[in-house]
Amino acid sequence: MSMNLSESDFLHRVHQLDERALAEVYDQLSPGIFRYAMRLLGNTDLAEDCVAETFSRLLRVLHKGKGPKDHLKAYLYRIAHNWITDQYRRQPPPPLELDEAMTVDSGKTVQDEVEHNLHQERIRAALYLLPETQRQVIVLRYLEGWSVKEVAASLKRSSGAVKAIQNRATTSLRKYLTAQEENE
Amino acid sequence: MTHNNHDPRLDAKLQASLVILDDVPEREANAVLRGRNLFLGEAHKLKNSTTSVPKRRHSKWMERFQTIFPFRKEGAPVLTQVISALLILITLLGGAGAGTVYAAQASMPDDVLYPIKTWSENARLDLAVSPEKDIDLSLKFAGRRIDEMLRLKEEGGEVPELLVTKLQKHLNRAAQLCDQTGDPLHTRQQMRQTLMNQERLLDNAPEDAQMRRTRDMIRQQIHQIDQTPVNGGALPSNADPSASAEPQDRDRLRTNQPEGSGNPDANGYQEEQTPGGPNANPDTPGQQNGGQKLQRTKTPMPGQSGPQQGPKN
C-alpha cells in the first residue's frame, strides 16, 4: 500500500489504533480482501462477513499489544484465508441464486450467466481439492497478482519454498481440471 | 484485478480457467461505508479502553524473579509484572483466589495469570468424580490448548513447547481412562469425534514443524482409537477394530457423524458430552506410556508421573 510515512511509522500508528491510519488501512486493503473472499466463496454476504471479521480480528490483536511488525497486507490476507478455510469447512458456500446471476451482467443471457457461474463453481471446487497452502499460493499468485516475495511473507516461507509449492499446485490443479473435463 | 503476474509455467488453458474467477461484482457502496464505520467505531471503542504497553528490557534480577512465573507477558513493564505477581500471591493467600482463578480462565500462555489457569485445570482433574468426568475435562482442556496454539499463531507469536507437551498429556490421560467408563465404545466414539474436530481446527494454522507434529499427535490418537478392540476383545494389531463389537456397536464406531451434528464449540469440543455408566476394561493397548493406566483413586497430575510427562507448570 502506498503510504506517506515509512511503513514502520505507519505501522506504529496502526498499533496505536490511530483512527486515520486505520481508515487508510481499511480503504486500501478492504477492497482486495473482499475480492479475495468473493473469488474463493462466490457469495457477496459471506465475502462481506469475511472482510468484517478480518478487520475486527486485526483490531483485537492490536488491542492486546500484538499484531504484525511488518507486512500488514500479508497479515490481513492470512487472517482472511484462515476465516475462509474455516467457513468452507463448516458450510460450503451455497450456489449462486439464479436471480443474482441474472443481474450480474444484463448483456448476457440467463443461460450464459448460469454457465459462467457453473464454470466458476467448478474452478472453486478444483481449488478446494488442493491442500490449503497450495490453494493459497495459486490464489495469491495468479488471481491477486502477488509476487513470490509477497506470498512468501504471507505464508512465512522462503521464496524457494513458495516456488516449489507453486509448481506442485499448478500440476495438481491441471490434473483436477482435466479430470473434471473428462467426467463431463 | 487481472493476472498481472503471469508465470510461463502456467499454460494458457490453466490461465484461462483461473481468469473465470476474475469476474467479481463490484462491492456495494453502502456495504463499504457500513463496514468502514463499524471498523472505525470498534477501533474507537478499543482505543478508549486501551493503555499503551511500552516495551522494556528485562534486567537480570527480573529474569530471576520471573522464573517463579514461567509464562510472563514479554511486553509488559517490569513494574506491572512485579505487581501482578504479588497480587496473585496476595489474592491467593488472602482468600480471594476464586476471583483470580476465574479471571485466569481467559489468559493466554504469555499472560501472567496463565499458571493459575493450568493450576485450576489440574485441580479440577484431581477432583473429577468419575472417569467420564475426567475424560470430559481432559478433552476440554486439550481443546483449550489447541485454541491457545491457534490464537498464538494467528497473532504471529511462537507456541511454547510446554503447550504441546500439555496437549499430549491431556490426550494421553483421556485415552487411558476410556476403558474405565461404563460404555467404552461410546466414550471412544465421542473422543474420536472430538479429536477429528480438533484436527480440522489445526488445519487452519500456518504450516510449520510444530503444527505438523501437533496434528500428527492427534491423528495418532484417532488411529489408536480405531485400533482399540471393543468390549475387551483381543484383536490382532492389524485387525478390523470393530470386528469384535456387536453389529450396532460396529456401526456406531465406524460412523463419522456429520460435521456440526454434535455442535462442537470453537475449540472442537462438545461441552455437554457425558459418556455414562459404570464398568471398566483396563487394557487399552498402544498407549504411549506403555499401557500404564491411570487409576481414579490415585490420579497423578499430568506432569507428575509417567515416562513421557514433562515438567509441571
Image (cartoon, coloured by chain):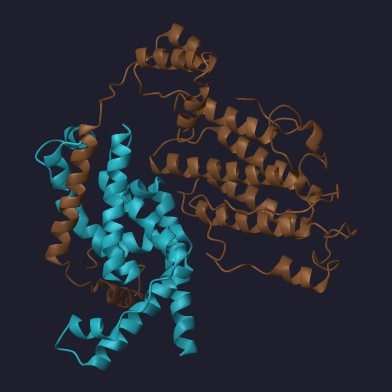
Horizontal side of A170 relative to B92 (left or right) equals: left
Pick the quarter of the image with the N terminus of chain B. Answer: bottom left
Horizontal side of B148 relative to A57 (left or right) equals: right
Residue A88: x and y in percent read: 42, 65
Q: Quadrant of residue B55?
A: top left
Chain B: give its colour: brown
Q: Residue drawn 28% across and 74% down?
A: B19
Q: Residue drawn 36% across and 67% down?
A: B9
Q: Is residue A178 above or below residue B79?
A: below
Nearest the eye: A38 or A141 = A38
Chain A: give its colour: cyan
Nearest the eye: A2 or A164 = A2
Residue B292: x and y in percent read: 82, 39
Q: Residue furthest right?
A: B234
Residue A81 appears in the rendering: yes
Q: Residue drawn 85% across and 49% down?
A: B280
Q: Quadrant of residue B120?
A: top right
Q: Residue furthest top?
A: B61
Residue A71: x and y in percent read: 28, 43
Q: Quadrant of residue B123?
A: top right
Pick the quarter of the image with the C terminus of chain B. Answer: top right
Residue B178: x and y in percent read: 76, 49
Q: Residue furthest left?
A: A4
Horizontal side of A96 relative to B159 (left or right) equals: left
Q: Residue drawn 72% across and 55% down?
A: B187
Q: Is residue B70 above or below residue B65?
A: below
Residue B109 appears in the rendering: no
